[in-house]
Amino acid sequence: MKIVISASAPMLDAPVDPRFGRCSYYLFVDTDTGRFEVQENTAALSGGGAGIQAAQTIVNAGAAAVVTGNVGPNAYQVLNAANIPIYLVAGVSIREAVNAYKMGQLPQASDATNSAHSGMTPPPAPTSPPSEIDALRAEVGELREVMAKLLTKIDEIAK
């Protein structure tokens, strides 16, 4: 089943963005395989109607459910009219939200959870847990080593 989650960054370990219409990204996750696709939210910076635009994007993409922190009245109406349930979550990573969804642990929204235009103020910047930072630093180190080897090989071939 394909669900969509409002995301603060384009990866599974990113925090769920509490805003639906003005989140930075949407992660479309296949709950059966764990594979995901990232889509930047082009409605996020619009002057108005972000919730409607975002909801229409989700409907057009064929998502079976939405997982987010909050949803405004306009987005709720569009998703509700398309029979797409909205599940609420807060303070967890996207990976954790997917697992909670699969286990049936998320409450379903029965109405909008925010007023119109409430998502226009961005949430505080997410902080990465130390383990994620360490993993990213290790990956950068490995990439530097690969680049150094490639540059050495280019120099050798160019001589």
Image (cartoon, rainbow, N blue to C red):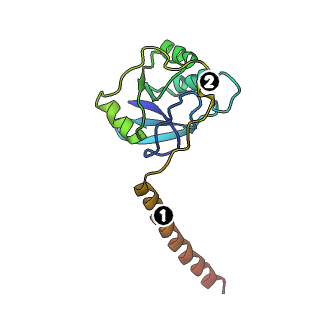
Q: Quadrant of residue 132?
A: bottom left
The quarter of the rendered structure image containing the C terminus is bottom right
Q: Which mark is residue 53?
A: 2
What percent of the width, then of the height, locates residue 113? 49, 19
Mark closer to the chain start, 2 or 1: 2
Q: Which mark is residue 117?
A: none
Q: Residue at x 43, y 30 (%)?
A: 3
| Above or below, comparing residue 133 to residue 120 in the picture | below
- Residue that lies at the very extreme toward the bottom in this rendered image: 159
Q: Residue at x 51, y 72 (%)?
A: 146
Kindly report the distance in space between the C-alpha atoms of the residues bearing marks 2 and 1. 37 Å
Q: Nearer the viewer, residue 78 or 60?
A: 78
Few, some or many residues within 10 Å of mark 2 (<14, 14–19, 20+): many
Say which residue label 1 marks: 137
| Above or below, comparing residue 126 to residue 26 in the picture | below
Q: Residue at x 42, y 14 (%)?
A: 110
Q: Residue at x 46, y 29 (%)?
A: 68
